[in-house]
Image (spheres, rainbow, N blue to C red):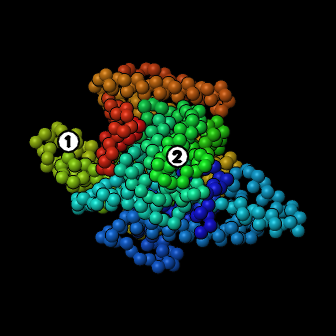
Amino acid sequence: MAHLLETQRSEHHFHIPVMGTGFTNTTALEVAPLGVSSVIALADDTLLEQSRAALSKQFGLEYQPIGPKDDDFRARRTQAFLDLIADEVERRFEQLRTSPFVPGSPIQRYFELLPETATKAKWRSLSSVDPADRSRVETELRASVIAGHIEANIMTKLDSGFTLAGEPKPPEQSDALSSMRGFATSKLRSTIVLSAGMNQRLFAYMATLEAFYPNQAGVFEKKLCLKVSDFRSADIQGMMLAKKGLWVSEYRIESGLNCGGHAFPTDGQLMGPILDEFLKNRKSLTEKLYATFAAALRAQGRPVPSEVPSVCVTVQGGVGTALEHKLLLERYKVDSVGWGSAFLFCPEVISIDEVTLNQLLVATRDEVQLSKASPLGVPFWNLTTSKAEQARKSRNESGKSGSSCPRGILAFDTEFSDYPICTASRRYHLLLKDKVKDAPVELARRQEAAEGKACLCGDLAGSAQIRLGIDPEATPLICPGPNSVYFRRVASFDEMVGHIYGRNDVLPEGTERPHFFLNELEIYVEYLEREIGDNPATTNVRLKWVERYKAGLAKGIEHIRELISEGWIQESQSFIQTLGSLEARLLSMGQAPKPMHPPSFPSDANAVDSQPALSPLHIRKAQAT
């Protein structure tokens, strides 16, 4: 398992982020041997087990099922799936690394896909190498081949402590802790990406797992990555973990709104200024955290790395051209750029079914909506024409609204039940009608909201279930980011990589796609306009939130103008007009409304709720930090 022990990164400077609960779960099989990193979602252990069964059959391997009544089944399912992917990636990687240097071979493809580096130049010169030296150069080139990382993701607050039947689980059997244990015991030497805020119980549990501590040589078996929306969140969470002797090896910055899936709006802070803050304070943050980290290790009697462990800063959210990719790498010095929604048009490496792909290919901006479909009460990017949305509307029209709730991953509401249930479930809808029946106006309002909730943890698995032959009748839901509406054709993996590095263009000719910083600004302005329109009531707290939000956007506009003056953004007439129009819209907004996400958050990160059960308020508190 040579590459699984590898601490180096390949020379690619992009990665494929986690998408949904199943779109990227088998991506590593295709891209890791070629040096590209991707992320597996650990939220849905049922899907992981179904996928393991399907892949074992496909690979001709023996399959031993792990049932929902087996001991520690969620952790064991997670470990078994990750080990299966790791073994198959290893097999494919070794096949690639030992293939001949001839046209069309796997190793030739590996080097063709690389960005322009010294390694690639050396490979290009192979044809002109003296025959007596060719064997030596080939050996050196083979040694430079590095597999992409097989990373995994846990949404930290998706940590239900109850079974579907409402029975409490033992503390260490909660969803997030079980998934973490499965990752920690897997054979991967890789990174776990923690997203969606803080879960102090999970953080404390991680401190009991030896895999996350450095050995005598200062090497980590498993690494930690925090997905954050701003510098303050990285500082606070990084310090919380450092105090436990845990080192954050990567901070993955994601745009609050210009992304796919769940969206966590910042107080108007845009990606440019956030990245600038990381650029200016990265060194001081690392030094501060190292001092705390080293002190914690010494107190525990553990070996302390003699040098500050490496820290990567990566970014994702709305990028769509080679120039934007270059801007992030060179202006902000990030280590890698995540390309998410663009890869939804690359079924060669993403688990998207044909019907959903065709719907996405023709989707308009009105059909890719920042919706209220998530049972978590968090804004959620949703394709409104998907089969899942059609099925949801059909259930509503027939008077049988609500899902059967086959997974219970998002079951956190206890208003009508003595144990958590999901607001998208049939059970919740029936209880709502029964408990609020004496208030018809209130019932109508709440019923409309409930009927808009989607079964995320069931239907997000649909595309993967169809692609793997698990359930051909599944009704897939998909959560593309707003950037997806500019990609209008299916692309091969090689074409998409070429697009990222500027070797070719997969966007349709004549596409009028705004710069991703401009697109992010517009989405944030629209969000504020909608919040002001939907919430006419005012309080001092809400007014202060609006002013903070507007101040954040004003700072973002100033930063965009700095990028223009520095020559990073081409000053086209269209760009300047759109920027001016958005600024005018911002200035014209009056003081007002209560936002969709109340701004009265605790200023102290330690006030963030430490219980594992998730509610919309818990998510909002975590996001605020």
Q: Which residue is mark 1?
A: 444
Q: Residue 402, position in %: x, y?
A: 26, 54
Helix, strand or loop at label 2? It is: helix
Dot placed on the residue nearer the N-terminal end, 2 or 1: 2
**Front-lying residue, 296 or 423:** 296
The residue lying at 65 percent from left, 25 percent from top is: 565
Tell me the tag on residue 560. Answer: none
Helix, strand or loop at label 1? It is: helix
Which amino acid type is shown beneath numbered disc 2?
Ala
Tell me the tag on residue 294. Answer: 2
Residue 214, image quadrant: bottom right
Q: Residue 580, position in %: x, y?
A: 54, 23
In the current view of this chain or complex, which residue is farthest to the left? 438
**Front-lying residue, 159 or 382:** 159
**Front-lying residue, 580 or 6:** 6
Above or below residue 612? Residue 101 is below
The residue lying at 47 percent from left, 59 percent from top is: 210
Q: Residue 511, position in %: x, y?
A: 59, 41
Above or below residue 363? Residue 144 is below
Which amino acid type is shown beneath numbered disc 1?
Ala
Residue 362 visible in the picture: no
